[in-house]
């Protein structure tokens, strides 16, 4: 009870963590749109520009499991401070190279590599701290606020990135370095939160195959939950398709002569949609219960991707991507809250990392696939192919018994649709048929 009350009053700690990570999201989103554009300007090849996004996502993917182990073994605040310092240094270094006019393609690849790996560690450590900073019944709202943070950072980062690049190519990285420095300072004021209890079973004993020292425990934990297994499979496929569609839209706009500032505004529309969706997620979760947000996101993605391919208008792609992003945070909040409530604090970093590894696997190859797709079949055919794949994924989700019988989450006290039943204990993987 005392720990819960401390978390209830720990809004200041969550606010510090949220603000620090929002600044990191800003810097990351700035680099995400600027680096491929710089590579395209240097090489003239969409495929080589896609390599930048591939390296960033692959580094995040490969660093995922070690990041979770680091977040569980060491003080999470200290880990985040080191990551912020490294990112500030590499952003500043690339800014200096660009200012001096000596930047090269390998330098861009190098920043993407460090950016992806350090961001993976920051994400694992930061998300694992959240249950210790808020009361359990407010965890879903905190997860939704994190989604809002991500989209707010993307909105500000993509918009600022395009305009800063138009002024001087070094400015996006100078500003990114400053953002990471401010984030580092904010973390210095963050106290280590108490460990939060989990709704699931106790972790395996120290030193066992599944104990705190084993990376495989995150895999085994997720493997025991059919709903989480299937949800991560859909997330992987969706991230792949969305990443490819996003790259095709941005690269084709650049090839058609759209200015970098206009591209930044178009890409920022996705951030606006996601931000609005994240702010509305707590209310939407009371209306779209269970897996309904997942069905909505998958079908919207399929239909609106086809719309991007065939509908006219310079700003149509940005508006439709924003509509997809508006529905996504509610589904993300449901999955993430269910996962955090079941996971013991000593294992949260690894479970988060494994989940990120699974959902990010598709995103790791998406920019490269998008560049190849654009080179081989062009914009319209590539987008229609992605829409067809998403249609099949959406249909399989609707037909799945596991998705239709999705477990319910406990609601905050006083919510009209509160569910009093506890979260189910995970059954052994052999007890249920996979879907």
Image (cartoon, helix red, strand yellow):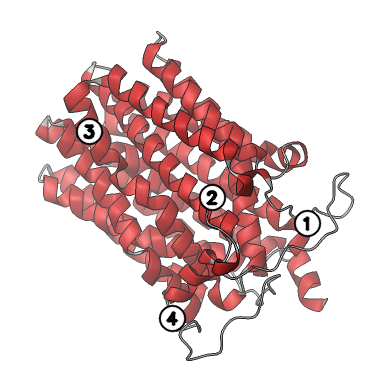
Q: Earlier in the sequence, mark 3 or mark 1?
A: 3
Estimate how packed mark 1 is, as few (under 14), some (14 to 19) or many (20 or more) residues with alpha carbons within 10 Å.
many
User: Relative to residue 222, is residue 53 drawn left or right?
Assistant: left
Residue at mark 1: 410
Residue at mark 4: 214
Q: Is residue 416 above or below residue 72?
A: above
Q: Is residue 415 among what the camera can see?
A: yes
Q: Nearer the viewer, mark 1 or mark 2?
A: 2
Callout 3: helix, strand or loop?
helix
Estimate how packed mark 4 is, as few (under 14), some (14 to 19) or many (20 or more) residues with alpha carbons within 10 Å.
some
Residue at mark 3: 371
Q: Is residue 393 above or below residue 141?
A: above
Contact flag, marks 4 and 3 (Cβ < 8 Å) = no
Front residue (pair 191, 300)? 300
Q: CA distance from mark 3 to mark 2?
A: 27 Å
Residue at mark 2: 231
Residue at horizontal 44%, vertical 45%?
A: 26
Contact flag, marks 3 and 2 (Cβ < 8 Å) = no
Q: CA distance from mark 2 to mark 4?
A: 24 Å
Q: Earlier in the sequence, mark 4 or mark 1?
A: 4
Q: Is residue 192 among what the camera can see?
A: no
């Amino acid at each position: 009870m005392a720990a819960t009350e401390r978390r209830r009053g720990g809004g200041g700690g969550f606010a510090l963590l949220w603000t620090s990570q929002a600044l990191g999201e800003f810097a990351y989103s700035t680099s995400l749109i600027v680096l491929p554009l710089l590579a395209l300007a240097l090489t003239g090849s969409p495929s080589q520009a896609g390599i930048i996004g591939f390296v960033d996502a692959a580094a995040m993917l490969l660093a995922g499991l070690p990041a979770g182990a680091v977040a569980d073994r060491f003080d999470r605040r200290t880990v985040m401070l080191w990551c912020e310092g490294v990112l500030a240094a590499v952003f500043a270094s690339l800014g200096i190279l660009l200012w001096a006019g000596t930047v090269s393609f390998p330098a861009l690849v190098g920043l993407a590599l460090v950016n992806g790996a350090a961001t993976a560690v920051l994400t694992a450590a930061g998300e694992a701290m959240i249950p210790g900073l808020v009361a359990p019944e407010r965890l879903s709202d905190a997860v939704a606020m994190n989604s809002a943070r991500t989209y707010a950072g993307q909105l500000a980062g993509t918009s600022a990135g395009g305009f800063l690049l138009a002024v001087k190519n070094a400015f996006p990285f100078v500003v990114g370095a400053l953002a990471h420095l401010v984030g580092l300072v904010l973390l210095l004021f963050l106290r280590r939160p108490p460990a939060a209890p989990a709704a699931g079973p106790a972790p395996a004993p120290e030193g066992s195959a599944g104990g705190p020292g084993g990376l495989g425990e995150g895999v085994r934990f997720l493997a025991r939950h059919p709903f989480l297994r299937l949800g991560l499979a859909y997330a992987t496929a969706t991230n792949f398709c969305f990443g490819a569609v996003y790259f095709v839209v941005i690269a084709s706009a650049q090839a058609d002569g759209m200015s970098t500032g206009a591209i930044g505004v178009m890409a920022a529309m996705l951030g606006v949609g996601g931000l609005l969706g994240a702010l509305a997620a707590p209310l939407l979760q009371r209306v779209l219960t269970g897996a309904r947000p997942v069905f909505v996101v998958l079908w919207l993605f399929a239909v609106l991707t086809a719309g991007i391919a065939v509908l006219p208008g310079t700003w149509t792609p940005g508006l439709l991507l924003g509509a997809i992003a508006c529905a996504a945070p509610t589904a993300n909040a449901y999955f993430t809250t269910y996962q955090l409530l079941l996971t013991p604090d000593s294992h949260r970093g690894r479970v988060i990392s494994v989940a990120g590894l699974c959902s990010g696997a598709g995103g790791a190859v998406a920019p490269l696939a998008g560049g190849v797709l654009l080179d081989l079949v062009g914009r319209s055919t590539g987008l229609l192919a992605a829409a067809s794949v998403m249609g099949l994924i959406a249909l399989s989700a609707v037909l799945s018994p596991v998705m239709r019988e999705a477990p319910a989450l406990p609601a905050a006290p006083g919510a009209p649709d509160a569910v009093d039943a506890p979260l189910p204990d995970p059954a052994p993987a052999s007890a249920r048929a996979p879907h």
